[in-house]
Amino acid sequence: MSLDALLTTSPPTSTTNRVLYVIACGSPLARRVGRLVELAQHAGWEVCVVTTPDGAKFVDQPALARQTGYPVRSHYKNPGDPDVLPPADAMIVCPATVNTVTKWAAGIADTLPLGLLVEAQGRGVPLVAVPFTNAAMAAHPAFRTALGRLSEWGVTVLFGDHVVPLHPPGSAERHLPAFPWETVVAALPEPSAATSAA
């Protein structure tokens, strides 16, 4: 099915699988988010991909639409437009950038992904954040404070050398092959345990 067809037809309807939103931010790691989609699908999730505006520059939107059966969304819809994605039972932000993490913790909702996350947190939807950034960016106090706040508020935060060691600025590409996608998927709740807040 073409991307144009996906955008003009009703989304598939699932009666068994819980829905996971995979939110990808602007990072080289986002180019490999299809692997996360694949593993989550194998774990029993119905997956939709949402990206930040910068994240959209990294992903292959037509390929992800074919893989998931849903268009990749990056922006708020226009008033009156129908929803093209089913409600989420859980969300995972991977890769999560310093920008998205700090804005999210501050309650800023100036992009579609942030709006979804802020609302989902208020509705009790299970959330997982997986930052992927360099050592210089991660050293900013606001980022560390934001991670602490999100964790205190019930977000599962996967961060640290036990997950992904920080890398020097400009070296992200060299660290992509070793990214532990299986560990990320293991942090999600069981699909049968996730409860829709819709």
Image (cartoon, rainbow, N blue to C red):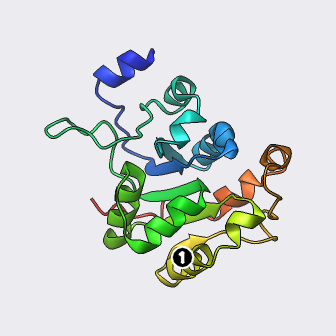
Outermost residue toward the left in this view: 80
Residue 188 can be seen in this image: no
Q: Quadrant of residue 63?
A: top right
Q: Is residue 118 above or below residue 80?
A: below
Q: Is residue 135 left or right of residue 5?
A: right
Residue 193 can be seen in this image: yes
Q: Is residue 145 left or right of residue 51?
A: right
Residue 145 image offset from top left, x and y in percent: 57, 81
Q: At label 1, which amino acid type do we have?
A: Ala
Check the picture and name the quadrant holding the C terminus. bottom left
Q: Is residue 141 left or right of residue 21?
A: right
Who is closer to the viewer here, 136 or 75? 136
Mark 1 burial class by Cα count in 10 Å: few <14, some 14-19, many 20+:
some
Write the residue at 81% across / 71% down. Answer: 162
Q: Quadrant of residue 41?
A: top right
Q: Secondary structure at mark 1?
A: helix
Please give the count of numbered marks on the rendered protein. 1
Residue 104 image offset from top left, x and y in percent: 44, 67
Q: Is residue 72 above or below residue 116?
A: above
Who is closer to the viewer here, 120 or 100? 100
Who is closer to the viewer here, 183 or 165? 165
Check the picture and name the quadrant holding the N terminus. top left
Q: Is residue 18 left or right of residue 164?
A: left
Residue 65 image offset from top left, x and y in percent: 49, 28
Residue 32 image offset from top left, x and y in percent: 69, 39
Outermost residue toward the bottom in this view: 152
Q: Quadrant of residue 180?
A: bottom right
Who is closer to the viewer here, 46 or 126? 126
Instruction: Identify residue for label 1.
Output: 146
Write the residue at 56% across / 34% down. Answer: 57
